[in-house]
Image (cartoon, rainbow, N blue to C red):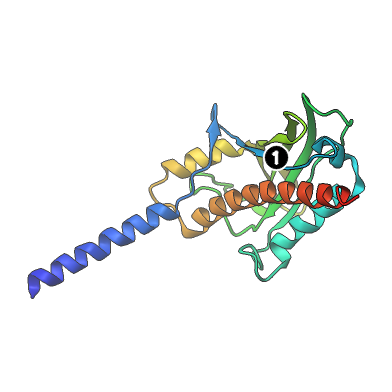
């Protein structure tokens, strides 16, 4: 019976360790920088997908859908004090070999440090956010690559009398996080949330394209 207890206890410890490891997010890096890329092929037939970026509806839909990430009770980010903003830029109406530049930005709750190794000293942290560039590269009439890169971690800290702004590549923060053997649950959740937000942007962009071209192709 004692042997069985020891075996079960060991199994539980192994499962806990594996569960913790599975929770640790895998953020893609390229040359040390955070870099996401998604390629999607859709079923539009009437117009090039690039035409739909030029309409006001695209921006409005993107704003509404990204807002839902934090406002909807059914979403994992609800009530986490994030604010997400994204846009897809403007289109010139060309079908291929065209890149449209947009932006992604979201505030991060001040209670979370991206890594224990990052220390503000005696400065009071007033705000922190993450910003990135969005690129939509159209490969042909129905296929595009969505890129999210240039992720920057920004802070405003100091005192009421003197506030200072700092910027750091998020890739550096993530490498510090990976090297830290005392990762906190908040830090793990932060990088999981970053990964979730980026994948949601990919889903949202695809969803908007489908909504717009399906309505257009009813005629």
Q: Could you tell me which residue is drawn at 85 percent across and 37 percent down?
A: 47
Counting from the top left corner in percent of width and height, residue 91 is at: 87, 34
Q: Which residue is drawn at 59% across and 54% down?
A: 193
Q: Circle 1 sits on which residue?
A: 132
Between 184 and 160, which is closer to the camera in this rendering?
A: 184
- Please tell me which residue is depicted at 76% across the width and 54% down the height of the picture: 160
Residue 28 position in % (x across, y down): 53, 38
Q: Is residue 44 visible?
A: yes
In this view, the residue farthest toward the bottom is: 1
- In depth, the one of 97 and 140 nearer the eye is 140
**Residue plotted at (69% across, 48% down):** 201
Image quarter for residue 6?
bottom left
Q: Where is residue 122 in the image (x, y as percent from the top left)?
A: 59, 51
Left or right: 113 as drawn, with respect to 148: left
Residue at far top of view: 97
- Does any portion of residue 113 appear in the rendered image? no
Number of on-image labels: 1
In the displayed structure, 60 sits above or below 176; it is below
Residue 153 in the image, given as x and y percentages of width and height: 65, 42
What secondary structure is found at the residue carrying circle 1? strand
| Quadrant in the picture for the N terminus | bottom left
């Amino acid at each position: 019976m004692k042997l069985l207890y020891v075996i079960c206890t060991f199994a539980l410890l192994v499962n806990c360790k594996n569960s913790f490891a599975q929770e640790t997010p895998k953020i893609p890096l390229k040359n040390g920088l955070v870099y996401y890329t998604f390629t999607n092929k859709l079923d539009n037939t009437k117009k090039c997908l690039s035409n739909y970026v030029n309409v006001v509806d695209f921006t409005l839909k993107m704003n509404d859908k990204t807002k839902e990430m934090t406002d909807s009770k059914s979403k994992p980010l609800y009530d986490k004090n994030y604010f997400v903003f994204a846009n897809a830029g403007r289109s010139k109406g060309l079908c291929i070999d065209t890149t449209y530049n947009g932006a992604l930005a979201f505030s991060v709750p001040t209670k979370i440090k991206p890594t224990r190794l990052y220390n503000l000293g005696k400065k009071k942290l007033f705000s922190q956010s993450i910003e990135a560039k969005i690129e939509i590269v159209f490969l042909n009439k129905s296929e595009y690559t969505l890129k999210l890169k240039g992720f920057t971690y920004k802070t405003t800290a100091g005192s009421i009398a003197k506030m200072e702004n700092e910027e750091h590549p998020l890739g550096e923060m993530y490498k510090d996080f990976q090297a830290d053997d005392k990762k906190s649950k908040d830090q793990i959740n932060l990088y999981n949330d970053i990964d979730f937000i980026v994948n949601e942007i990919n889903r949202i962009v695809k969803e908007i394209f489908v909504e717009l071209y399906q309505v257009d192709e009813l005629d």
